[in-house]
Amino acid sequence: MKYIALRVRTAMLVHGYTAENQEIVEEFHDEPFFEKLIAIERIQSVTEKYLLVSSSHGRVMYWEYEGDLDSIAQRLNAAGLLIA
């Protein structure tokens, strides 16, 4: 299994969906950043501000990360994990 080390903090946790297909979202504010090794297989997408990662029980989480999208793309590319 491959990992990437990033400084992240929890921004949102999606618990599921309502009967009207609306996300049930728990938001977190001003959490501290912490260093985390993240399994590449958990990453669903990366934006300029957030990582969308799979979580337990079929949930997904949005983690805010320090840095920018370009630096993450460069690191993934250097490891042979990015197809551009």
Image: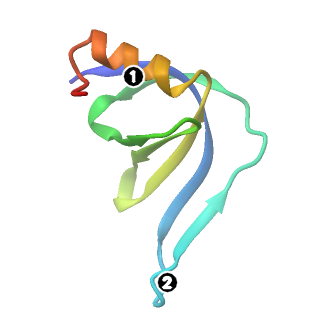
Write down the quadrant of residue 33 in the picture: top right
Task: State the mark number for residue 18.
Answer: 2
Which of pointers 1 and 2 lies earlier in the amino acid sequence? 2
Q: Identify which residue, 79 or 57, lies in the foreground.
A: 79
Q: Secondary structure at mark 1?
A: helix
Q: Secondary structure at mark 2?
A: loop
Residue position for label 1 = 73
Residue at far front of view: 84
Determine the residue positioned at 38% across, 53% down: 56
Q: Amino acid at mark 2?
A: Thr
Determine the residue positioned at 41% across, 44% down: 53
Residue 3: give x, y in percent of width and height. Answer: 32, 21
Determine the residue positioned at 39% across, 22% down: 73
Residue 13: give x, y in percent of width and height. Answer: 55, 56
Q: Split into 4 quadrants, where in the image is the C terminus?
A: top left
Residue 64: give x, y in percent of width and height. Answer: 60, 37
Task: State the mark number for residue 58.
Answer: none
